[in-house]
Amino acid sequence: MCPNSVLKVTKLKNSTNMVLLNFFGSILPDRVQIGPINLRIRRFVSRPLQCFSCYGYCHGKSSCKEASRCSNCSALDSHSEEHCNATVYCIHCRDAHQVRSRQCPRYRLEQDILQLANTQFISLGSSRRELLYRQKDILCCICRSEDDDKCYFSLCSDGWSC
Ligand SMILES: [Zn+2]
Ligand SMILES: [Zn+2]
Ligand SMILES: [Zn+2]
């Protein structure tokens, strides 16, 4: 592939041997030659954005408007994870794992949304609607929390609410 189809090169913060390349078009080459360097290309999929205060998705801690939670037991405004003596409980799926767990169906859904947006070249909003529509029946069971009966998908501005 001709290197001038590379649109932008960004150095990644946490890596010494990886760079982020933006290409023109929708076909990804396996390798790209830039001067003397031959680079192996892999598709970049970012991680779901999860707030480190309320542990909701689609926003970061700095723009959070919700009450903070314990990441271990999901209790509101009470204590931090290090001081938690309660049983582990996930607010998103009501299962016994930490609210940040990558095993959580909600985390996996967010990851699928990113993946679909990346592979289909559609916006995150369209990808979210598409996947939520496909998984409607499953999601309806996990989107309401027991303590405030709030729909947790409504945290996402462009999401689907039930
Ligand atoms: Zn938040
Ligand atoms: Zn706790
Ligand atoms: Zn969960």
Image (spheres, rainbow, N blue to C red):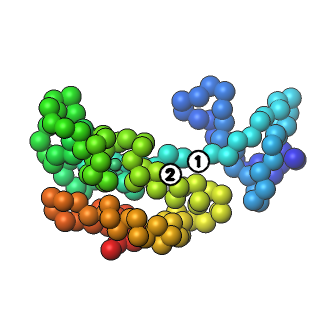
Viewer-proximal residue among 135 and 162: 135
Density class for disc 1 (Cα within 10 Å; few <14, some 14-19, many ≥20) is few
Outermost residue toward the top in this view: 16
- Asked whether the viewer can see residue 157, the reply is no
Disc 1: residue Cβ within 8 A of ligand 3's nearest atom = no
Choose top left, top right, bottom left or bottom right for residue 25: bottom right
- Quadrant where the image shows the C terminus: bottom left
Q: Residue at x 21, y 41 (%)?
A: 73
Q: Where is residue 49 in the image (x, y as percent from the top left)?
A: 42, 49
Q: Are marks 2 and 1 in contact (CB under 8 Å)?
A: yes
Q: In terms of secondary structure, where does tag 2 sit? A: helix
- Asked whether the viewer can see residue 94, the reply is yes
Q: Position of residue 105 (x, y in %)?
A: 41, 52
Q: Where is residue 72 in the image (x, y as percent from the top left)?
A: 24, 38
Q: In terms of secondary structure, where does tag 1 sit? A: loop
Q: Residue at x 65, y 63 (%)?
A: 120
Density class for disc 2 (Cα within 10 Å; few <14, some 14-19, many ≥20) is some
Q: Which mark is residue 111?
A: 2
Q: Mark 1 points at which residue?
A: 45
Mark closest to the chain's N terminus, 2 or 1? 1
Report the Cα–Cα distance between label 2 and label 1. 9 Å
